[in-house]
Image (tube, helix red, strand yellow):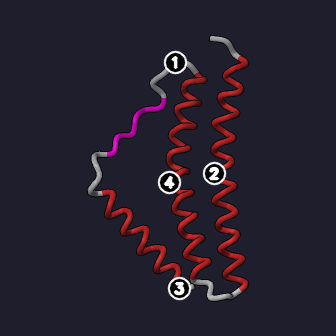
Amino acid sequence: MKRVIQLILLILVSLLGLASFADAIVIENPLTSEDIGAILTNIADKLANIIGGVTAIMFIASGILYLTSAGNPEKINSAKKCLTYAIIGLVVVLLAKGIIKYVQGWFPG
């Protein structure tokens, strides 16, 4: 288990190191609009971007957990739980964006 945690930390640190080679990260203010619907849409879009990245990391982490389980049923269940939670998180984000768009359709203008 200690090796798995070390491997995950190594991957995360290496990914953070790669981010230093990227262009400057610009975070736009989501509250630039006067319309509450546009504000909610902007916030949902930003959260979807962040959670999308976290979901990708969780997919990779669950794959690593599964590969390093060596047939141990407890570790396999842990990997399955990790994958399940990653999928649930992704579905919640997609539903949140859909619900916001749906509710915006109720209010004209």
Q: Could you say whether the residue bearing mark 1 is in a helix, strand or loop?
A: loop
As measured in the structure, the alpha-carbon distance from the residue carrying label 3 to the one carrying label 4 is 24 Å
Label 1 vs 3, first from the N-terminus: 3
As measured in the structure, the alpha-carbon distance from the residue carrying label 2 to the one carrying label 3 is 28 Å
Label 2 vs 4, first from the N-terminus: 4
Residue 27 counted in the magenta span: yes
Q: Amino acid at mark 1?
A: Glu
Task: Mark 3 vs mark 4: give the one in front.
Answer: 4
Q: Residues within 10 Å of mark 1 (few under 14, many from 20)?
A: few
Q: Quadrant of the C terminus?
A: top right
Label 2 vs 3, first from the N-terminus: 3
* Residue 90 image label: 2
Q: Percent x, y for residue 23?
A: 28, 47
Q: Amino acid at mark 2?
A: Leu
**Image side of residue 4 versus residue 97, left or right:** left
Q: Amino acid at mark 3?
A: Lys
* Residue 34 image label: 1
Quadrant of the image occupied by residue 19: bottom left
Q: Which residue is mark 3?
A: 2
Kindly indicate whether the residue at mark 4 contacts the one at mark 2 (C-beta within 8 angstroms): no
Q: Quadrant of the N terminus?
A: bottom right
Q: Could you say whether the residue bearing mark 2 is in a helix, strand or loop?
A: helix
Q: Percent x, y for residue 84?
A: 70, 63
Residue at point 62%, 88% (across, down): 70
Task: Mark 4 vs mark 1: give the one in front.
Answer: 4
Quadrant of the image occupied by residue 20: bottom left
Task: Mark 1 vs mark 3: give the one in front.
Answer: 3
Q: Which residues are magenta?
A: 25-30
As measured in the structure, the alpha-carbon distance from the residue carrying label 1 to the one carrying label 2 is 29 Å
Q: Could you say whether the residue bearing mark 3 is in a helix, strand or loop?
A: helix
Q: Which residue is mark 4?
A: 53
